[in-house]
Image (cartoon, rainbow, N blue to C red):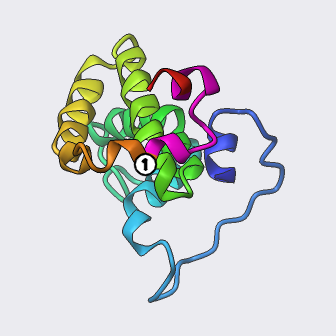
Amino acid sequence: MKLSLVYLDDVDGGEMTFQQPGALHKARWMAKLLYSLKIALLEKDISELPPGTITTRQQVPNIRAFVTFVTHVYGIWWQTCKKTVDAPWHDLQLYKRLMQYKMIDKNIAQSATRDLNRHRWYLTAEMVPLALFSHNVPDRTQSTC
């Protein structure tokens, strides 16, 4: 999370140091995200290396776009949903953020929305009432259900 805040310039990175990852780490499935954040944060240093050492010139804008999406949309969604009962509410908030993100990057927003739609299988008539137990759902919304 701190990498996202440093990227957004919300927190002073100060003398931030990056450690080389070990063979096993808890966030292995998020490796692309973590490495992309680090590459974006170190972009000026990487540009001083010989061309093609870490990234090509064509990859840099794509990495920056990916990191911007993660820090503005996905990171918030991933960090805030900690309970099963909150999942439907958080998915709705994610969908709303994706609609807003279309103003920043239409292609990424459409791709993410398409992927999110593939994961609506759990929104069955039996599972939707689970959201009524979430403290995130406003009382006014719960009372109308």
Residue closer to the observer: 37 or 92: 92
Question: Is residue 3 placed above or below 7 in the rendered structure?
Answer: below
Q: Nearer the viewer, residue 113 or 131?
A: 131
- Name the residue rendered at 57%, 51% in the picture: 79
89, 34: nearer the viewer: 89
How packed mark 1 is, by other alpha carbons closer than 10 Å (few <14, some 14-19, many 20 or more), is: some
Tell whether position 135 is magenta.
Answer: yes
Image height of 67 relative to 29, above or below: above
Q: For the point 64% across and 33% down, which residue is it?
A: 8
The answer, for residue 70, to whether it is visible in the render is no
The residue under the point 19% across, 37% down is: 117
125 sits left or right of 97 in the view: left
Which residues are the magenta region? 131-142
Say whether residue 142 is visible: yes
Q: Secondary structure at mark 1?
A: helix
Residue 107 at x, y = what percent? 23, 23
Q: Is residue 3 magenta?
A: no
- Along the line of sight, which residue is nearer the eye, 13 or 42? 13
Q: Position of residue 65 (x, y in %)?
A: 38, 32
Q: Amino acid at mark 1?
A: Leu
Residue 73: x and y in percent read 47, 34
Residue 131 in the figure: left or right of residue 123: right
Q: Find residue 143 and report its horizontal and vertical position in percent.
A: 55, 25
Quarter of the image where the C terminus is located: top left
| Residue identified by numbered label 1 | 130
Total marks placed: 1
Give the residue drawn at x 39%, y 38%: 91
Kindly give the residue lying farthest to the top in the view shown. 103
